[in-house]
Image (spheres, rainbow, N blue to C red):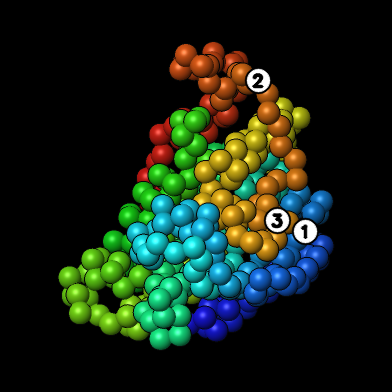
Amino acid sequence: MRLRMEKLIKEQQKRIIDELSKIDGNAFTIDEWDRPNGGGGISCVLQDGNVFEKAGVNVSVVYGKLPRPAIEKMRADHKSFVSADVDSLDFFAAGLSLVLHPKNPMAPTVHLNYRFFETSDPKDVLNGKTNWWFGGGTDLTPSYLFPEDCEHFHKTIKDVCDTHDPSYYPKFKAWCDKYFYLTHRNEARGIGGIFFDDLDTDFIRQSSPASVSISDKEAQERLFSFVTDGLCSFLPAYVPIIKKRKDMPFTEQEKDWQQLRRGRYVEFNLVHDRGTSFGLRTPGSRIESILMSLPRTAKWVYMDPVSGTRTDGVESEDVEGMEREKELMEVLKNPKEWV
């Protein structure tokens, strides 16, 4: 599974950057790197392009030993994580992550991450039982709301989920709405998508009564197939949207609003995101790749009139002529069912 996951994410990385390069008219910078403690990756980044202000498509395949701080963080976030009291733990992680920040405020930011994680038995690294799971998902973060875009994005994802299990989309959509939420702002980061973690044999058994006796190998195959289809659905979900919105006219006020929304994106990634937190706790981690998701530009304004929140909990006053901005905020405060 380690080798198959690595092959999948590298193939999809090439497929994605080839398509995005055609849309932007510029090539990605391809940066191959090694991790001193084991493994490495390929970071593909496009900055200051015609369409994308910053686009990053990153593959990482890393392994080695997790130190105590990283172990404690993983235990808090993952039910299947080893509970033994150890100071270090052998691990393997392979994943593809991307974040695209378009120049045009009418075009939405998008995020994707699909990963496989495995840890060895601390008492018997070679022959002991391993813990493994899949995680990931994808979500859309617009600055301006186009309901047809939201519906297309969610429908494409739902169709993939339904092919594998009709319970996946409602479960993972709700999980996404809960995860990508700025609790200190009382608002969602965007209009969601799907998010999942800890998908393992127990998950399959609990999801389907008919799968109670499924083996670890069968469960892993089933979940790998789902992750493969999820990754392959990214371009059909996002490309029609970016092609429609990349050349739309916009005003200076609309660009300014995009900068404020990107500020919220930064807040989420630095305050709440598990992947960022885990990466920064892992020895030999590559900071440039971990923080690749941050936008090229962003802005913070004290008490901005639409989305600023007073310390007493009272919302800021309505502002004349900012109906579309308020429309987005309403959805971020009250997540919708798009399909």
Q: Which residue is mark 3?
A: 287
Q: Residue at horizontal 65%, vertical 46%?
A: 107
The residue lying furthest to the bottom in this view is 127
User: What kind of element bears circle 3?
Assistant: helix
User: What kind of element bears circle 2?
Assistant: loop
Residue 146: image location, x then y, percent: 54, 42
Q: CA distance from mark 3 to mark 1?
A: 17 Å
Q: Which residue is mark 2?
A: 302
Residue 136: image location, x then y, percent: 48, 61
Say what amino acid the circle numbered 1 marks. Answer: Leu
Q: Which residue is mark 1?
A: 46
Q: CA distance from mark 2 to mark 3?
A: 29 Å
Q: Nearer the viewer, mark 2 or mark 3?
A: 3
Q: CA distance from mark 1 to mark 2?
A: 31 Å
Q: From the viewer's side, name the closer residue of 169 and 288.
A: 288
Q: Nearer the viewer, mark 3 or mark 1?
A: 3
Crowding near pointer 3: few (<14 within 10 Å), some, many (20+)? few
Residue 219: image location, x then y, percent: 33, 78
Q: Residue at horizontal 37%, vertical 45%?
A: 337
Q: Nearer the viewer, mark 1 or mark 2?
A: 2
Say what amino acid the circle numbered 2 marks. Answer: Tyr
N-terminal of the two: label 1 or label 2?
1
In this view of the protein, can residue 161 be seen by the observer? Answer: no
Say what amino acid the circle numbered 3 marks. Answer: Ile
Q: From the viewer's side, name the closer residue of 144 and 88.
A: 88
Residue 195: image location, x then y, percent: 44, 56
